[in-house]
Image (cartoon, helix red, strand yellow):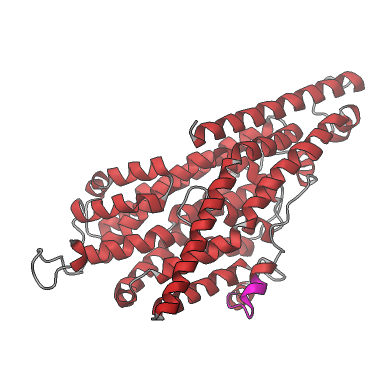
Amino acid sequence: MKPHQKMLIGISAGAVAGLTANAVATAMARSASGISEGPLPAAVIAQHAPWLSWAADSVAAPVGQIFIRLLLMLVVPMLFSALVMGVAELDLKQVGRLGLRTLGYTVVFSAISVLIGLLLVNAIQPGAGLSDEARAMARGAPQVKAAPAPGETSFGSVFVSMVPTNPLKAAADGDFIGLIVFSLIFGMGLALTQGEAALRLKETIQGLYDVMMKLIDGVLRLAPFGVAALLFSMTARLGLGILAQLAAYVATVLLALGLHMFVVYSLSVRFLGGRNPIQFFRDIRLVMATAFSTASSSATLPTALKVAEENLKLPRNVSRFVLTAGSAMNQNGTALFEGVTVLFLAQVYGVPLSLPDQGLIMFICILAGIGTAGVPAGSIPVIAMILGMFKIPVEGLGLILGVDRFLDMCRTTLNVTGDLAAAVYVARGEPVDRPAGEGAADPSAS
């Protein structure tokens, strides 16, 4: 069976079992208490059906929490190795001009994508339909501690904390912003350092990255069981209402992704790249199909390079630099998804987030999007880290994991489309490739 088919079975089994358990427990409580109409208080259900709390808290929740902890365990080495290799493999001779334009485009359009997501979440309120009692039941569930809440969440303190005095302590304390900045600086230092020792270190970090990706792939093989347990635990407590929130969440994410792809990127291609947006999307349809089917920016990179050179007629040096860097760092769709998910779960669990908090989440999502691996489900550990920072119950990820594969395919399509839109912008004004055989031709073209 394919992974998405196994995940679908896990989703269905967990949700159906949880809803069935909730319905049976509610019927038992109504029969025993004599209350035939209206919602039953949680205390009444717990009194007349104690087995429901035992099954959710003592059986399903621990299984789901182990799955979440396995993901959290891999966050630090995954972020460090992915960021270091993403920077170290860049051609620093081109970083001056091309790098500044690419970085500026990435930051601006990542900010726009996250802002679109946050505005839609606040307008639609997909997670705000639960009753206060249901929220209290959800918050009373056992929680996984992902990271300590920051002592201060002002922008000034966040900027100061971006430069850690001890990167190992920052990683141990859950200060992932400091870890990301250190990894970027370390990657630049590794790229600038010549010699055999630096080359061996780069190979070692590449090996660490490969091992982390293998481990994440192994953990995700357990996802059907973990998702089934997490969904059972949540639906058994909250009933059918939580699935309505989930449908609204999926619709919000898809609407935000669609707006960013077909409105924002169309405007970018037209006014920044000087091209026809309709022709642009027609030229890259192969890349979009590949990204949607693989849910991996990294796996789509060879196809994106081919399409950029043959269909879009971009200079080879521009397309190779922008698309290689973008597959690791220009993750607009991932940043949008992370922001929407954090605010959605905050609404589900009734965790209030002020405008400064949401601004900080937006900033973290932009920064974390740089360090999110271009592999399926690479953003899940990062979301868990952000949830822990703002004291939002991490086990809520069980809902997200249930639909993440489909949303991952959609946001990866947005990511690679953004890489190509960035390449079109950066290529404008750059000299075109000379025909093969001339002295200035790209030697790697052969």
The quadrant of the image that shows the C terminus is bottom left
Residue at image location 11% in from the left, 66% down from the top:
434
Residue 112, how many percent across, how many down?
44, 59
Q: Quadrant of residue 179?
A: bottom right
Residue closer to the observer: 178 or 426: 178
Residue closer to the observer: 222 or 406: 222
Say whether residue 49 is magenta: no
From what the image shows, is residue 21 above or below residue 344? above
Residue closer to the observer: 256 or 60: 60
Q: Quadrant of residue 272?
A: bottom left
Residue 226, how many percent across, how many down?
65, 40
Q: Quadrant of residue 21?
A: top right
In the shown orientation, is residue 402 left or right of residue 52? left
In the shown orientation, is residue 79 left or right of residue 57? left
Magenta segment boundaries in residue numbering: 162-170
Residue closer to the observer: 256 or 338: 338
Decide if residue 445 is in sight here.
yes
Residue 1, how many percent across, how many down?
50, 30
From what the image shows, is residue 417 above or below residue 250? below
Decide if residue 371 is in sight here.
no
From what the image shows, is residue 433 above or below residue 297? below
In the shown orientation, is residue 159 left or right of residue 50? left
Residue at image location 30% in from the left, 77% down from the top:
93
Residue at image location 74% in from the left, 37% down from the top:
60
Residue 77, how many percent across, how many down?
57, 63
Q: How many marks?
A: 0
In the shown orientation, is residue 445 left or right of residue 402? left
Residue at image location 48% in from the left, 45% down from the top:
408
